Image (spheres, rainbow, N blue to C red):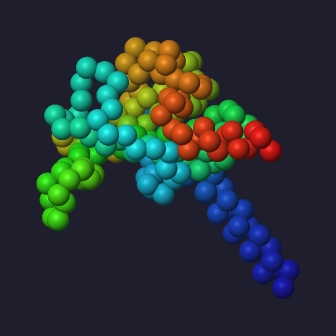
Amino acid sequence: MRGFILATFLMGAVLLGAEATTNSPQFTNDNKLIRPEGYREWVFLSSGLGMSYGDTAYDEAPNFTNVFIRPEAYREYVATGKFPDGTVMVLEVRKSESKGSINKGGHYQNRLVGIEASVKDEKRFPEKWAYFSFIGDGREPLPQAKPFPKEACWTCHNQHGEADNVFLQFYPALREAREKAAAK
């Protein structure tokens, strides 16, 4: 019986270790972020339509942007008001359509046109946050991406992000959850 209990305990420890590894951002030896898998199962923060922060867009039609955050980072932010080291947020860009099937008005999401990620890693990045894009030239998602230069994303996030380089102003669910937790 003791052998069974010990084996069960060891298996649980191995699984917990594997879960911790897969929940952390994964990088190649040359500092490229490996595209997070399963992000659509993370906490959904918001969706925007036609939002653009720069001069370029993925497509001529207004696109939907869906933002997801790792559940562990979401829970810690709600509890403490701080994004923990290892926070990963994914921005998924999807083409909007208005003509299809029985639709007579409005827009719906269609094909994937972009995947971007932001990662907080205070040991790896001098500015604490780095930003990545996994799609280019209309191709399928890339398996890994190098960080954008500081001027490309970090500067804007640092100047306009409402909290810790994050555009909290666009994520009402995150703000509301934090306010409820702080009121307790």
Quadrant in the picture for the N terminus: bottom right
Residue 132 coordinates in the image, percent (x, y): 40, 32
Residue drawn 51% across and 53% down?
Answer: 42
Q: Does the image show residue 178?
A: yes
Residue drawn 46% across and 44% down?
Answer: 46
Q: Nearer the viewer, residue 59 or 178?
A: 178
Residue drawn 19% across and 60% down?
Answer: 103
Q: Quadrant of residue 148?
A: top left
Depicted 111 relative to depicted 117: above or below: below
Q: Nearer the viewer, residue 110 or 104?
A: 104
Q: Quadrant of residue 63?
A: top left
In the image, 183: left or right of 103?
Answer: right
Q: Nearer the viewer, residue 125 or 113?
A: 113
Residue 74 coordinates in the image, percent (x, y): 61, 45
Residue 167 coordinates in the image, percent (x, y): 50, 29
In the image, 100: left or right of 106?
Answer: left
Residue drawn 15% across and 64% down?
Answer: 101
In the image, 100: left or right of 181?
Answer: left
